[in-house]
Image (cartoon, rainbow, N blue to C red):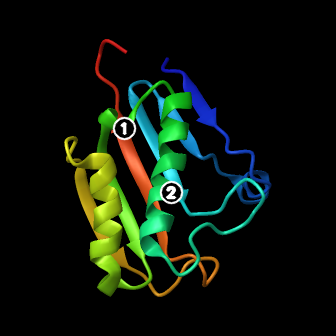
C-alpha cells in the first residue's frame, strides 16, 4: 500500500475547510491552490500580480521541499488570475521559477478569489523520479 503524506501550512483554515497545503502519495505530489497570504494572514503584494506570483511560487517551493521534492519535479502549473490582461507580469514571475523546467501550464481568468486583494492563485502537480 502506498503511503499518504499530508503537508500542512499551519493555516487555521485547513481544519475548518478540510484540506492540506500539499499531499504526497507515492511519487506524486499535489499542491493546493496557493495565494499570497503570509503566516500572519497578511496579503503580500497588494495590487501587484508579479509580487504575488513570486511569493506564491516560493510558498509552493517550500511545500515541495517538505514533501521531498523540488521545483524541478513540477510537471504542471495552474494559475488562476482575476485579470488576464496582467498575464505578462504573472508570466514573468512564473518564468523566473520555471524557465528551464518548463512544466505544462495554464493561466485561467476567474471572476474572483476568496479576497478581492488576491490577484493570483496557483496549484501545481509534481512527480518524483523513481530514485527519490
Image quadrant where residue 88 sits:
bottom left
Q: Residue furthest top?
A: 131
- Residue 21 at x, y = what percent? 60, 47
Is 25 on the left or on the right of 130, as rendered? right
Q: Point out the tag, 2 or 1, that comes first from the N-terminus.
A: 2
- Residue drawn where x is 42% and y is 82% of the image: 110
Mark seen at residue 34:
none
Give residue 86's quadrant in the image. Answer: bottom left
Residue drawn at x 37%, y 15% as measured from the top left:
132
Q: Foreground residue, 32 or 117?
A: 117
Residue matched to label 1:
71
Task: State the image coordinates of residue 64 (x, y, percent, origin top left).
Answer: 48, 35
Q: Given contact means CB atoms under 8 Å apart, are the residues at marks 2 and 1 in contact?
A: no
Q: Residue at x 43, y 28 (%)?
A: 69
Using the image as rendered, state which of residue 92 and residue 16 is in the foreground.
92
- The residue identified by callout 2 is 56
Q: Secondary structure at mark 1?
A: helix
Q: CA distance from mark 2 to mark 1?
A: 13 Å
Residue at 47% of width from left, 41% of height from top? 61
How many numbered discs sit on the rendered protein? 2
Residue 106 vertical placement versus 32 (above, below): below
Q: Residues within 10 Å of mark 1 (few under 14, many from 20)?
A: many
In the image, is residue 119 above or below residue 30?
A: below
With respect to residue 62, does 2 lie above or below? above
Give residue 52's position: percent from left, percent from top. 50, 66
Tell me if mark 2 has few (under 14), some (14-19) or many (20+) residues whose alpha carbon lies within 10 angstroms of its own.
many
Q: Secondary structure at mark 2?
A: helix
Q: In x, y percent, where is residue 122?
A: 44, 60
Amino acid at each position: 500500500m502506498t503511503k499518504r503524506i499530508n503537508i500542512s501550512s499551519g493555516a487555521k483554515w485547513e481544519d475548518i475547510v478540510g484540506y492540506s497545503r500539499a499531499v504526497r502519495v507515492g511519487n506524486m505530489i499535489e499542491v493546493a491552490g496557493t495565494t499570497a497570504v503570509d503566516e500572519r494572514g497578511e496579503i503580500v503584494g497588494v495590487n501587484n500580480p508579479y509580487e504575488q506570483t513570486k511569493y506564491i511560487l516560493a510558498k509552493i517551493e517550500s511545500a515541495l521541499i517538505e514533501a521531498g521534492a523540488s521545483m524541478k519535479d513540477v510537471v504542471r502549473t495552474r494559475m488562476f488570475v482575476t485579470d488576464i490582461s496582467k498575464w505578462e507580469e504573472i508570466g514573468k514571475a512564473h518564468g523566473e521559477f520555471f524557465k528551464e523546467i518548463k512544466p505544462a501550464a495554464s493561466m485561467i481568468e476567474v471572476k474572483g478569489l476568496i479576497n478581492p486583494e488576491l490577484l493570483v492563485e496557483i496549484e501545481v502537480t509534481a512527480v518524483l523520479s523513481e530514485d527519490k
